[in-house]
Amino acid sequence: MKLPQEVYDIAEAIKSMTIRGAGKIARSTAEALKITAQKSTATRVEEFVDELTLAAKILYETRPTAVSLPNALRYIMIRCYSDYEKGASLEEIRNDVIKAADEFIRNSLEAVNKIAEFGSMRIENGDVVMTHCHSSTAIAVLKRAWDEGKRFTVISTETRPRFQGRITASILASYGIPVKMIVDSAARFFMQDVDKVIVGADAVAANGAVVNKIGTSMIALAAHEARVNFFVAAETCKFSPESMLGGLITIEFRDPTEVVDQAFLKENPGIEVLNPAFDVTPAAYIDIIFTEKGAIPPQAAILILREEYGWFTKAPLPDFLRGVRSVPLSHIS
Ligand code: RI2
């Protein structure tokens, strides 16, 4: 089964983090399914559904933590499978998949704008705001507040090992926002100067815990100790329906060579270098999660999930990918 080259390219770009940031990952995933539908030359409905299922599997296996990715797949594939079950024609399914992908992307972009609107209400003149890693959603909040005429300073961590904090710092600085950049381990040292912290999220669990870039939970702890507000900016597509069933969010461990080079590893065979990409901040250390549905206390995450998925007892991942058609394992390599 041959998929359009773009699907493999997008999957590779997500894996290698050329495409990164939970929101962008999800939108790119939707785009890849759309391209699969648009370019498919399948002549039978079953073949078409199998192609989409294979594309979904390839995309699903790229990175494990950002829940927005499987949620994007679910949003689109559920429509595909239910059309198939109803006996829809290939062209009808193709149109619905393209429509669902466009809808997901549009909703996601609109969500970021809404979050910016809500989040900016909590940024005030004279604030010192700390942020960690590169969250396009947190940046949208800060840009919006700046556009509204509020004047504040941002402290951006560098964010080892991939230094996404440098991207944040340079985006904000080129927007005219004063930025100070610090090493991650200086976060507590500077917390006494900070009025609020805002970060993004890769996943939000039913109990309000937030999974975000490694180091986030230490910053939340330092903010809690210093009685500094800790805000999260997250689209509801990052909320995990599996967590309603007790499913845990997988923390991605990436290659040690992101932390040290090959020569170091060779010279020090006795050292195991560990590189978790994310950590979990418990609800107790979070004041507000800004979503497109409003500013919620983290404990209300379950309400958002209930509204979106009901009790979600039927189709936990990865079962939904199996859908009504099953893709032989030999197709996946
Ligand atoms: P937006 C990123 O993960 C960061 O952890 C960031 O906080 C989060 O995604 C959300 O990003 P990675 O892809 O969706 O850099 O707010 O590992 O852009």
Image (cartoon, rainbow, N blue to C red):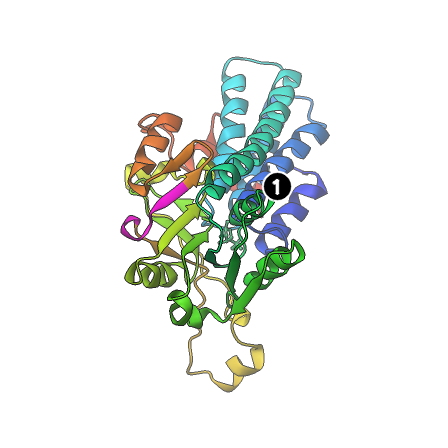
Locate residue 129 relative to residue 163 in the image: left or right.
Answer: left
Q: Please tell me which residue is depicted at 62% across the width and 14% down the height of the picture.
A: 89
Residue at the spot 38% in from the left edge and 62% down from the top edge: 219
Horizontal and vertical percent position of residue 173: 63, 59
Report x, y in % for residue 143.
Answer: 58, 47
Question: Would you name the residue on which mark 1 appears?
Answer: 28
Is residue 102 or residue 7 the one in the foreground? Answer: 102
Count of all numbered marks drawn on residues in the image: 1
**Which quadrant of the structure image shows residue 4?**
top right
Q: Is residue 78 above or below residue 150?
A: above
Report the quarter where the N terminus lies.
top right
Quarter of the image where one finds residue 294:
top left
> Is the CB of mark 1 within 8 Å of ligand 1?
no
Magenta stretch: includes residue 286: yes
Q: Is residue 153 on the magenta stretch?
A: no
Image coordinates for residue 324, horizontal then vertical, percent: 48, 25
> In this rendering, would 300 be left or right of 28?
left
State whether residue 105 is above or below residue 82.
below
Q: Amino acid at mark 1?
A: Ser
- The answer to whether 306 is drawn above or below residue 176 in the figure is above
Magenta region, residue range: 283-289
Against 52, is 254 above or below? below
Q: Residues within 10 Å of mark 1 (few under 14, many from 20)?
A: many
The reply to whether residue 47 is visible in this rendering is no
Give 43 or 273, whichever is nearer the viewer.
273
Confirm whether residue 105 shows in the render: yes
Residue depicted at 42% across the width and 76% down the height: 272
Could you say where residue 118 lies in the image, as x and y percent from the top left?
47, 37
Query: Which residue is more in the foreground, 92 or 43?
Result: 92
Q: SS at mark 1?
A: helix
